[in-house]
Image (spheres, rainbow, N blue to C red):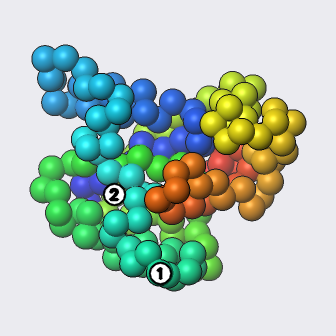
């Protein structure tokens, strides 16, 4: 069994808050870390660093099991990994490698709270954000230097 602890959620559902909470429970720091520092304290599966950036999305996805194995090998203790990917496969490649996984925690947030946050984060209208979370092919990129998340519809993501 691996040591990746997936902290999963639909985008903008409170994953950052959860990472801070779990970090404090496991590490017992004197003070909670600033939210801006959380990227340094956990991993993210949309970080392009382990991948060659010139690859096409399907090529990146095909490398996912290898990258997850390397993440496991690089960390002897359980390591928190943020993800907004839905549970599933693309082609015959799973989004999560079971052998690398120690546990997972899933945060569910009401879509009525996600839609305004998505609109504000992306600059789209509330109506467009509502349409986006109902698209099967919703693969957002929230940062310029990140990989897309394989998110899809809110209802499919939560029910997986």
Q: Is residue 12 left or right of residue 120?
A: left
Quarter residue 30 falls in: top left
Labelled disc at residue 54: 1
The residue depicted at 44 percent of the width and 75 percent of the height is: 53
| Mark earlier in primary sequence (2, 1) | 1
* Crowd rating for badge 1 (residues with CA inside 10 Å; few <14, some 14–19, many 20+): few
Q: Position of residue 28 (x, y in %)?
A: 15, 23
Q: Is residue 48 left or right of residue 124?
A: left
Q: CA distance from mark 2 to mark 1?
A: 27 Å
Dot 1 falls on a residue whose secondary structure is: loop
* Crowd rating for badge 2 (residues with CA inside 10 Å; few <14, some 14–19, many 20+): some
Q: Which residue is mark 2?
A: 101
Foreground of the two, 159 or 86: 86
Q: Position of residue 12 (x, y in %)?
A: 58, 36
Quarter residue 40 falls in: top left
The residue depicted at 51 percent of the width and 70 percent of the height is: 94
Which residue is at the far top?
Answer: 31
């Amino acid at each position: 069994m691996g040591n990746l602890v997936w902290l999963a959620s639909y985008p903008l559902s409170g994953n950052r808050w959860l990472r801070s909470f779990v970090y404090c429970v496991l590490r017992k720091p004197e003070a909670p870390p600033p939210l801006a520092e959380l990227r340094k304290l956990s991993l993210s599966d949309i970080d392009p660093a382990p991948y060659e950036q010139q690859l096409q999305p399907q090529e990146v996805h095909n490398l996912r099991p290898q990258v997850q194995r390397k993440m496991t090998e690089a960390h002897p203790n359980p390591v928190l990994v943020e993800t907004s990917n839905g549970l599933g496969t693309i082609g015959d490649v799973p989004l999560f490698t079971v052998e690398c996984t120690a546990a997972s925690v899933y945060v569910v947030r009401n879509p009525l709270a996600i839609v305004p946050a998505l609109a504000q984060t992306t600059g789209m209208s509330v109506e467009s954000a509502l349409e986006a979370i109902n698209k099967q092919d919703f693969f957002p990129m929230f940062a310029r230097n990140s990989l897309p998340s394989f998110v899809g519809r809110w209802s499919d993501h939560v029910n997986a």
